[in-house]
């Protein structure tokens, strides 16, 4: 099967386009990666060309040795992924040491994977262990209201989780573990990749102060839906703050407990104090 016809590629492109139309990807902002299943790589193997050299990942991911990923490209605009997938995206293979990768398809005009490849692969490595291989998608974007909140709330997991849980009734159901927050750091480096992947041990979403968010998911819908929900909740928080310094009422802790009981979910106790 041609790579562009494979279902996982079509879903990847659809999600990238959703992110663009939601306004999460100005210029070349944001990036997306998908851990390809063995049967999916077999569907397209006849169209892969291991003709380019092994390159350094910039970190070590021995857990992902020999695995294949579909990734967006550095400098690429999400608005072009739908109509120009072969130049804006590519399939890569991780080598057997987990320190190098090579391009097998895509990036036709000489591009290469996202500058955040270390963070993507380290997050995949952590989630692979925690979810028994079920997590497939890692997504990074720049949603405007969430970034605005990083100027208004204390930069810690508790402040963000409590605020965003309170803003929309279904938030605690969608991210019962809460969300992680990192202080401002230089993007594209191993340090921010290590810090993000540490937070991914506890959460499926990690906020980068004054920058954006990383989310994980077992499917494209799960990952995008989580980002979308968090950004919508952040938009409500920003709107409420824009109108008034104080809230007249909110979703209280007893209400959160009622919700957890009704939906049979376990909310992270850390954020219920
Ligand atoms: O420009 O979003 O964090 C791509 C990015 C880097
Ligand atoms: Zn970014």
Image (spheres, helix red, strand yellow):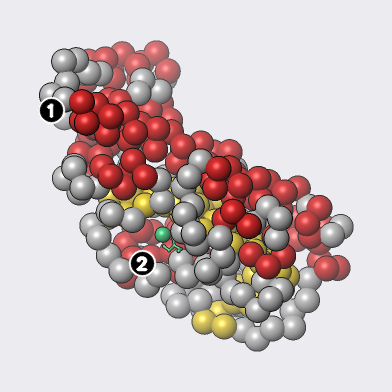
- Residue occupying the point 33% across, 43% down: 146
Is the CB of mark 2 within 8 Å of ligand 1?
yes
Report the Cα–Cα distance between label 1 and label 2: 32 Å
Classify 176 as above or below 193: above
- Residue occupying the point 62% across, 84% down: 54
Q: Earlier in the sequence, mark 1 or mark 2?
A: 2
Crowd rating for badge 2 (residues with CA inside 10 Å; few <14, some 14–19, many 20+): some
The foreground one among 141 and 256 is 141
Frontmost of labels 1 and 2 is 1
Q: Residue 250, located in which quarter of the rendered image?
A: top left
- Residue occupying the point 54% across, 38% down: 222
Say the numbered circle drawn on residue 245. 1
Q: Position of residue 217 (x, y in %)?
A: 52, 44
Q: Position of residue 113 (x, y in %)?
A: 57, 70
Q: Residue 157, located in which quarter of the rendered image?
A: top left
Residue lying farthest to the left in this orientation: 245
Q: Where ligand 2 lies, by quadrant?
A: bottom left
Q: In the rendered view of the protein, which quadrant contains the C terminus?
A: top left
Q: In the rendered view of the protein, which quadrant contains the N terminus?
A: bottom right
- SS type, badge 1: loop
The residue tagged 2 is 187
The foreground one among 61 and 178 is 178
Q: Residue 104, located in which quarter of the rendered image?
A: bottom right
Residue 131 appears left or right of 210: right
């Amino acid at each position: 099967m041609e790579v562009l016809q494979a279902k996982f590629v079509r879903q990847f492109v659809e999600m990238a386009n959703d992110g663009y139309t939601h306004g999460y990807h100005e210029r070349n902002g944001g990036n997306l990666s998908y851990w390809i299943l063995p049967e999916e790589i077999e569907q397209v193997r006849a169209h892969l060309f291991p003709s380019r050299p092994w390159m350094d990942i910039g970190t070590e991911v021995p857990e992902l040795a020999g695995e294949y990923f579909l990734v967006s490209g550095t400098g690429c605009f999400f608005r072009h992924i739908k109509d120009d997938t072969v130049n804006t995206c590519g399939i890569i293979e991780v080598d057997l040491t987990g320190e190098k990768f090579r391009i097998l398809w895509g990036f036709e005009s000489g591009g290469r994977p996202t500058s955040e490849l270390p963070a993507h692969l380290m997050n995949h490595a952590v989630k692979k262990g925690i979810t028994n291989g079920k997590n497939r998608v890692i997504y990074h974007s720049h949603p405007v209201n969430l970034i605005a909140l990083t100027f208004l709330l204390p930069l810690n997991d508790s402040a963000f989780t409590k605020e965003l849980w309170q803003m929309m009734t279904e938030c605690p159901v969608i991210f019962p573990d809460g969300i992680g927050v990192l202080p401002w750091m230089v993007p594209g480096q191993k340090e921010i990749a290590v810090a993000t992947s540490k937070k991914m041990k506890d959460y499926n979403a990690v906020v980068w102060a004054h920058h954006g968010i990383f989310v994980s998911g077992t499917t494209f819908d799960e990952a995008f839906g989580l980002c979308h929900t968090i950004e919508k909740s952040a938009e409500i928080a920003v709107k409420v703050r824009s109108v008034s310094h104080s809230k007249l009422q909110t979703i209280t802790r007893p209400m959160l407990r009622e919700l957890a009981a009704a939906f049979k979910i376990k909310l992270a106790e850390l954020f219920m104090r």
